[in-house]
Image (cartoon, rainbow, N blue to C red):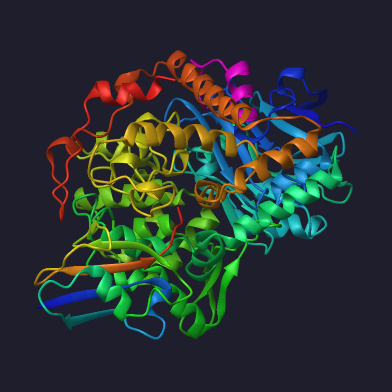
């Protein structure tokens, strides 16, 4: 299945802004985060959204999903 | 010497320096401005008449070495909302006023129509000088004239032409450490200053002393812990300095809560053009500065200097609300065009949120098209600045513009326009907009933190569950923090780092030799909200004013097709404390 992965803020450094990526059926968001090396990085996972909704890392992905990953960000 | 109250009467052109009444001793910032306004201003007075008062008060920790303590509060009855207003600002005024021992500066009365004055505040003295040469000038020209006249360190607060004309979207501009401008942005405080016949206020830095500390050792220790908490937090320590407040464009857009084309959609297709990541890339490529503090002692440094493609200065203090208002909400997809408008608005002294939202209303009225940055610039520079008929109509802000053009979709609460988070898709923030004593104000209780940013836990932004309690707790805490002189971004470490708030309270205790507890601080916040609400009620505002715009109940916001679905009873329960 094809998933759109969007990265923001420091996660873009050395990676990408947005990519269509292929994963086997049944892949969960956590596997994508792991594959991208985010857990080993300096910036822990802040916010995970699937199709614009906050979800736990364990959420299972489906064809055409948009997965957005953010380190902790804020402003106001 | 103990702090004092400086009082200026613009009817008689006289001043007095008074002892601080016991009841005001433990107050600063918003707690003090709101207490003074509630005690001394007739809630039924005309906000632009002789019976309103304009009050400035630095925070409890302003003027000390405490990190991020340089916020100055400005209070009055607001001509925009008709209720009480506190608007706080960075810049140099809080620190200098506090070091001079000015607990509060109260300006009352009104001079002969059409005359404008310059107030110069120094040790136990206020000179009130007529300043015809400054009339019709905008902020940077006034700032230059003052810096030429005085030591470079002098604090300057001024209004541009829109403030002189008492426009409801005018603000009070304050010199920052780099000689640029920050603003007491919201609620038409520039109009109040204009109505007092005051073009600018300078505060003398030459004779200032260091603020006294009751327990310097304890203060130093607490200050160290507090500063470390700010630096260790990923938002205040990493995200804000790297990308500025504008880092929010992408996350609010992804969540479907970025008000687009006058609150019609929750996502802007050109968000990437205007986001914080793009801004940071531009700054890196063009020169400029991604880290800049709005006041001395700031360790977060979320502000910046933004240059054009040739490397020439365009603007500074280029914030999320501004970029949203002209980007997503007015449809301008070129960050440089937005930057030029930002610089113009700094010079004129108009509120980015109220002005941007009013121009979005002007699109609906057929005056300009979405994305037409050149026309937007021209409407501000030629109409608002010069006070043409159209400029006066725009200058009245969203609510008044809507009435005159017969419009139904009016994104205001208590006549103050809604900032950069759509309440239908970020419901906790909607509760703050509805219930805040200030009108629609994101800073009054920033539920975005917990709804979107996962700060202080997480509450689903699209459901009602837990939102009223969240907005209540945040507003109580914010009213207290707004009294300390602290930047509101200390909320991020305060929400997630248990060392942060106790260190803040320890600093207040060490400064004044008191022994406040966490409960005392919560009670302070509650008392401020209650006294502000009581003022509003005496001014004629009721729970019917604690409501979001009606169209948000029946016009669904894409992509989540969210509606505002709280009952009146649910909203009114906010005040059960």
Residue B469 picture quarter = top left
Residue B71 appears left or right of B553: right
Quadrant where the N terminus of chain B lies? top right
Residue B551 picture quarter = top left
Residue B389 picture quarter = top left
Residue B63 appears left or right of B544: right
Q: Residue at x 62, y 16 (%)?
A: B39
Query: Which range of residues does the magenta coloring cover?
Result: B31-48
Asked if residue B446 shows in the view, the reply is yes
**Where does residue B59 sit, x and y in percent of width and height?**
68, 39
Residue B357 appears left or right of B104: left
Q: Is residue B30 above or below residue B339?
A: above
Observer-nearest of B370 and B325: B325
Observer-nearest of B341 and B34: B34
Please tell me whether residue B34 belongs to the stretch shown in magenta.
Answer: yes
Q: Is residue B531 above or below residue B240?
A: above
**Where does residue B512 sit, x and y in percent of width and height?**
79, 33
Quadrant where the C terminus of chain B lies? top left
Observer-nearest of B570 and B184: B570
Q: Residue at x 41, y 82 (%)?
A: A13
Q: Is residue B542 above or below residue B433?
A: above
Asked if residue B300 shows in the view, the reply is no
**Where does residue B488 sit, x and y in percent of width and height?**
54, 47
Please tell me whether residue B242 belongs to the stretch shown in magenta.
Answer: no
Total numbered circles: 0
Q: Residue at x 16, y 65 (%)?
A: A60
Residue B351 appears left or right of B270: right
**Where does residue B133 sit, x and y in percent of width and height?**
69, 49
């Amino acid at each position: 299945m094809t998933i759109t992965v969007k990265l923001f803020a420091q996660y873009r450094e050395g990676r990408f802004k947005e990519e269509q990526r292929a994963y086997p059926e049944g892949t969960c968001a956590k596997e994508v985060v792991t594959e991208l090396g985010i857990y080993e990085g300096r910036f822990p996972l802040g916010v995970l959204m699937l199709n614009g909704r906050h979800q736990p890392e364990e959420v299972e992905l489906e064809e055409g999903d948009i997965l957005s990953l953010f380190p902790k960000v804020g402003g106001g | 010497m103990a702090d004092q109250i400086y009082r200026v009467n613009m009817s008689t052109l006289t001043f007095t320096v008074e002892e601080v009444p016991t009841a005001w001793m433990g107050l600063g910032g918003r707690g003090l401005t709101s207490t003074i306004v509630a005690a001394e201003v007739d809630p039924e007075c005309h906000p632009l008449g002789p019976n309103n008062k304009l009050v400035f008060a630095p925070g409890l920790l302003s003027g000390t070495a405490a990190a991020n303590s340089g916020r100055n509060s400005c209070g009055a009855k607001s001509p925009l909302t008709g209720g009480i207003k506190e608007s706080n600002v960075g810049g140099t005024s809080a620190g200098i006023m506090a070091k001079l021992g000015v607990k509060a500066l109260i300006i009352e009365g009104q001079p002969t129509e059409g005359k404008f004055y310059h107030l110069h505040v120094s040790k136990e003295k206020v000179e009130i000088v007529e300043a015809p040469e400054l009339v019709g000038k905008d902020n940077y020209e006034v700032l230059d004239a003052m810096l030429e006249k005085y030591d470079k360190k002098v604090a300057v607060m001024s209004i541009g032409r829109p403030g002189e004309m008492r426009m409801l979207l005018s603000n009070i501009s304050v010199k920052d450490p780099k000689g640029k401008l920050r603003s007491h942005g919201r609620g038409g405080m520039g109009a109040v200053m204009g109505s007092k016949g005051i073009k600018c206020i300078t505060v003398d830095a030459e004779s200032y002393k260091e603020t006294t500390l009751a327990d310097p050792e304890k203060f130093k220790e607490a200050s160290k812990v507090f500063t470390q908490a700010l630096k260790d937090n990923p938002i205040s320590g990493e995200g804000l300095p790297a990308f500025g407040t504008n880092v929010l464009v992408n996350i609010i857009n992804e969540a479907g809560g970025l008000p687009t084309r006058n609150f019609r959609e929750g996502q802007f297709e050109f968000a990437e053009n205007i986001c914080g990541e793009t801004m940071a890339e531009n700054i890196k490529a063009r020169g400029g500065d991604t880290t800049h503090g709005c006041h001395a002692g700031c360790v977060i440094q979320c502000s910046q200097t933004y240059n054009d493609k040739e490397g020439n200065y365009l603007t500074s203090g280029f914030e999320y609300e501004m970029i949203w208002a002209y980007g997503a909400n007015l449809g301008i997809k070129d960050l440089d065009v937005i930057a030029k408008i930002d610089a113009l608005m700094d010079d004129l002294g108009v509120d980015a949120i109220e002005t941007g939202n009013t121009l979005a209303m002007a699109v609906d009225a057929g005056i300009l098209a979405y994305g037409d940055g050149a026309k937007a610039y021209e409407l501000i520079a030629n109409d608002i600045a010069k006070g043409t008929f159209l400029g006066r109509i725009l200058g009245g802000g969203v609510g008044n513009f809507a009435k005159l053009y017969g419009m139904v979709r009016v994104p205001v609460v208590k006549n103050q326009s809604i900032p950069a988070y759509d309440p239908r898709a970020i419901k906790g923030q909607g509760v703050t907009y509805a219930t805040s004593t200030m009108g629609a104000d994101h800073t009054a209780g920033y539920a975005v933190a917990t709804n979107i940013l996962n700060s202080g836990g997480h509450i689903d932004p699209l459901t009602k569950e837990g939102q009223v309690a969240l907005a209540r707790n945040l507003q109580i805490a914010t009213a207290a923090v707004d009294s300390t002189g602290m930047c509101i971004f200390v909320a991020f470490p305060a929400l997630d780092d248990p060392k942060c708030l106790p260190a803040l309270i320890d600093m207040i205790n060490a400064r004044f030799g008191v022994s406040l507890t966490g409960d005392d601080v919560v009670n302070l916040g509650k008392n401020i909200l209650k006294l502000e609400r009581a003022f509003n009620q005496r001014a004629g505002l009721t729970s019917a004013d604690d409501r979001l715009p009606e169209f948000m109940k029946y016009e669904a916001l894409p992509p989540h097709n969210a509606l505002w679905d709280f009952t009146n009873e649910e909203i009114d329960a906010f005040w059960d404390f």
